[in-house]
Image: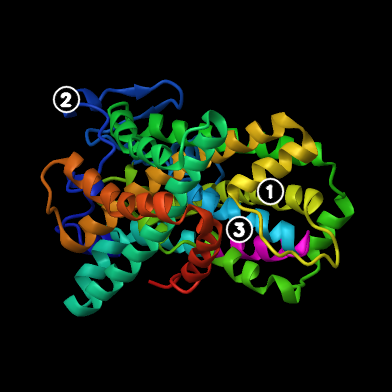
Amino acid sequence: MTLRDHESGSSRSPLHNQSTVSYQACDNDQAATQKDDEWNVQMDGKGQVDTSGDDTSQSFSWKKLIQYTGPGWLMSIAYLDPGNLESDLQSGAVAGYKLLWLLLCAHAAGLAIQILSARLGVVTGKHLAQLVRGNYSRPVGLAIWIFTQLAIIGSDIQEIIGTAIAIKILFGLPLWIGVLITATDTFLFMWLQQYGVRKIEVFFMTLIGVMVACFWVEMVLSRPSLGLILEGIIVPEIPKEATVQAVGMVGAVIMPHNMFLHSALVMTRNLGEKPSKSKIREANFYFAVESALALFTSYLINLAIVVVFAQVFYRPGQIITELPGLYDASRVLSNTLGEYARYLWAAGLLAAGQSSTMTGTLAGQYVVEGFFGAIFKKQWHRVALTRAIALVPSMMVAVLAVERFDTMGEILNVLQSHHTDP
């Protein structure tokens, strides 16, 4: 008997009982027969992707991988938010190619954590916030929620401001107006939900594709040294002057709230009311494969950014008095690679910011609902609360501390490295 069997009588997940944000595709009467043409998978009556078939053969199946593909790509967006982009460009500017090995190790550690998070949701039928609430005392649970919420707010500030910077580069709008525009992305996410989980997953995977295209084109244009790239990946070295960037890189990549998010996202796949051990093993395997592919892609994107700024900014022995930030990066690229590089950077930054703010909001909703239950009956109430929590400090930064945002971003990355264990 699995732990899921043992708890079959209890509430399984907000994605199952709609107590928190859901990917409800359509009315229950229609959902049972609905098929998603692009992915050719069957949707069940709860808006989930139906993976409850009896075929649990040991051989690898591309069809099954496609059925399970989605949660890992949404999870990987946290590895591509504006905080990561800023960490990457500053690491490249300060240390050149020398921290590429650390970036790889951080992604490998993140993959191990995300696989465990996914397994937690698959085996128990509950996500991490629900399990913390059910297994810890109220004071301990409250303390964990506070630290987790602070981490979410910190990353959300970076995401909102990063998106606002992209809007400023593209359209010349003031930062505070960009912050207000970014706040509307939650309503875009709510609108997307009516089209079902697979459409949402395709949307986010498309944004990841935009980032791959933009940042890899810039890397090719910068004409990097393949030998130095391989040396940076293979030879472990942390330059003395890059200690802060090294710690910030780990904090930017391994996000505390991502554990809560991933453990909940896997429950968009319906394994059946009482899945067998072989079905659970199958789900764990394909979720692990999907997560590995998604995080390898995110590593390639982060690597491209480090390489670009190592190539155009880093000079051995040079003392950097002021680190480049997300906005400064556009000017550096424009001066070295041409004006079009500025807009490629802004387009990639916009895709990173928009995708990460939406998944960050989703993570915040899981955390709030998991720790405190269904305190809001309507979804837009939950969305408004989680967005307001980050919007207020973001607006304060945009109006009062815009000149110091890049320093704040690096500090937030360092602080998050100390919150990776919930």
Label 3 environment density (alpha carbons within 10 Å; few <14, some 14–19, many ≥20): many
| Magenta stretch in the rendered image | 95-111
Q: Compared to 419, does 204 lie above or below?
A: above
Give the alpha-carbon distance from disc 1 to disc 3, as whole Å.
9 Å
Secondary structure, mark 2, is helix
The answer to whether mark 3 and mark 2 are in CB contact below 8 A is no
**Alpha carbons under labels 3 and 2: distance apart:** 48 Å
Which of discs 3 and 2 lies nearer the camera? The answer is: 3
* Percent coordinates x, y for residue 385 in the rendering: 22, 49
Task: Name the residue located 62 percent from the left edge and 71 percent from the top edge.
Answer: 244
Q: Earlier in the sequence, mark 1 or mark 3?
A: 3
Report whether 213 appears left or right of 264: right
The residue beneath circle 2 is 29
Alpha carbon of mark 1 to alpha carbon of mark 2: how far? 47 Å
Q: Indicate which disc residue 87 carries.
A: 3
Q: Amino acid at mark 2?
A: Asp
Is tag 3's residue or tag 2's residue first in the polypeptide sequence? Answer: 2
State the residue position of label 1: 305
Q: Quick one: SS at disc 1?
A: helix
- Magenta-drawn stretch, dominant element (helix, strand or loop): helix
Image quadrant of residue 367? bottom left
Residue 95, image quadrant: bottom right
